[in-house]
Image (cartoon, rainbow, N blue to C red):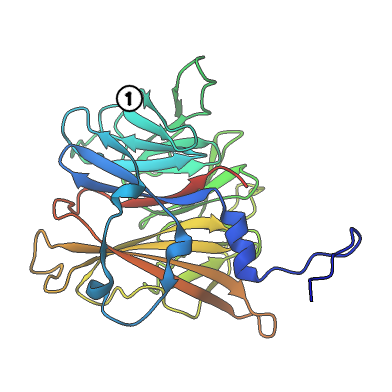
Amino acid sequence: MGKRPRSEDEEPPRLHACERRRRRRRGRRLHLIVHDYKLGCTVYKLDVDGFRPDKDDDLDSRAQRLPADHAAIRLASPDGRQCDEFARTGSKIFAFYHGRGAMVYDSETSTVGICPPLLASKHDFLDVGHDIYALETVDTTLNSTFLPSMEKLGPAPRPARGEWLWEKLPPPPIKLPGLTSSYAVHPNGSAFFISFLNRGTFSFNTGSLAWTRLGDWALPFRGKAYFVRELDAWVGLCSRNRGYISVCDVISPDGDGRRTSPPACTTVRERVYDNITARHVSASLTYMGNAEFCLLETVTAEGYDIYTDSKPRKLLRLATFLVERRHRNGELRAVNLRTKVYRLPHRDTAYCPTTVFWIGQED
């Protein structure tokens, strides 16, 4: 018997949650950036729907070559040296070269542009809305007169009109150099919050361009944390319990200049990577929207470890998962873990960052 035609007033059948997420992701891809040849790096566009449920079997047996047919573009270094840092805003990926300019790849239009050099050398790049902030808070020259500095790039110039410009901004009010340990952006974009190692946590108002010291405590993250609307909280890699995800309350941007207490935070139950093994090299996190994340983990290949091998062969483990709050007890869980493992080229070194971004055209 044929299917009964559905009337215009009848509601369509509800889609499975996984199918709804696939439809929301349509037209969007993971952009994996790897230094896989001598003169520069390659941007690969990966479809996460091809990832498979995570297993406890050997990573080496599941490792594949990077898919050449998914290579979107190769970015060659102007002078043969590798890129130092990457940053993203919108559909644009920036490849920064210290002391030089930056290459800008627009994934939506498949075009490449040039960004002018920084006013002064920087090592930390924060994406805040449509802008990129560059900070230098560590003295790499052993200069006794070193002072922190900060610049802002953006917004993007209109096509064929204007150019990218760097704007000098007030630097973080820290008296001694300090490494950036983590940062998070307020969901309304009015401020970002940044913790410096052993220097405390500060907020920067993007409107008034004013810094505020919040206290001697640090955000419970390592690297960038992301606002998740479904949880009304920031989510990022946990700095206290390595291998886990931390979720913490959002700090109000309307402080009156007084010091505040650290926000309440919770650790997600599941471990998403194992940093105890001697094969673990690094891990980072990127947000895919709708409470979904992608973990980028670099590990050594079988037979190598980080303690005895200066240039070990490496594997790249990409893992997507959903962070959700259980209704019964409010427990936070990392569920639907799916992975893909690739072999990294031998010439990829610890000094050349492998990076992943989630960008593309909106649905």
Q: Is residue 334 left or right of residue 244?
A: right
Question: Relative to residue 135, is residue 9 depicted above or below?
Answer: below
Q: Is residue 200 visible?
A: no
- How many numbered marks appear? 1
Q: Amino acid at mark 1?
A: Pro
Question: Relative to residue 265, is residue 289 depicted above or below?
Answer: above
Q: Quadrant of the N terminus?
A: bottom right
Q: Position of residue 197 (x, y in %)?
A: 36, 56
Q: Residues within 10 Å of mark 1 (few under 14, many from 20)?
A: some
Q: Is residue 196 left or right of residue 258?
A: left
Q: Position of residue 17 (x, y in %)?
A: 64, 70
Dot 1: element: loop
Q: Position of residue 262 (x, y in %)?
A: 54, 64
Q: Residue at x 58, y 44 (%)?
A: 191
The image quarter containing residue 79 is: top left
Along the line of sight, which residue is nearer the eye, 100 or 357?
A: 357
Q: Is residue 4 visible?
A: yes
Q: Is residue 160 left or right of residue 23?
A: left
Q: Residue at x 29, y 43 (%)?
A: 42
Along the line of sight, which residue is nearer the eye, 241 or 321?
A: 321
Q: Residue at x 38, y 39 (%)?
A: 135
Question: Relative to residue 122, is residue 331 depicted above or below?
Answer: below
Q: Position of residue 100 (x, y in %)?
A: 26, 27
From the image, tell me which residue sits under label 1. 117
Q: Residue furthest top?
A: 161
Q: Residue furthest bottom?
A: 328
Q: Residue at x 45, y 38 (%)?
A: 107
The image quarter containing residue 330 is: bottom right
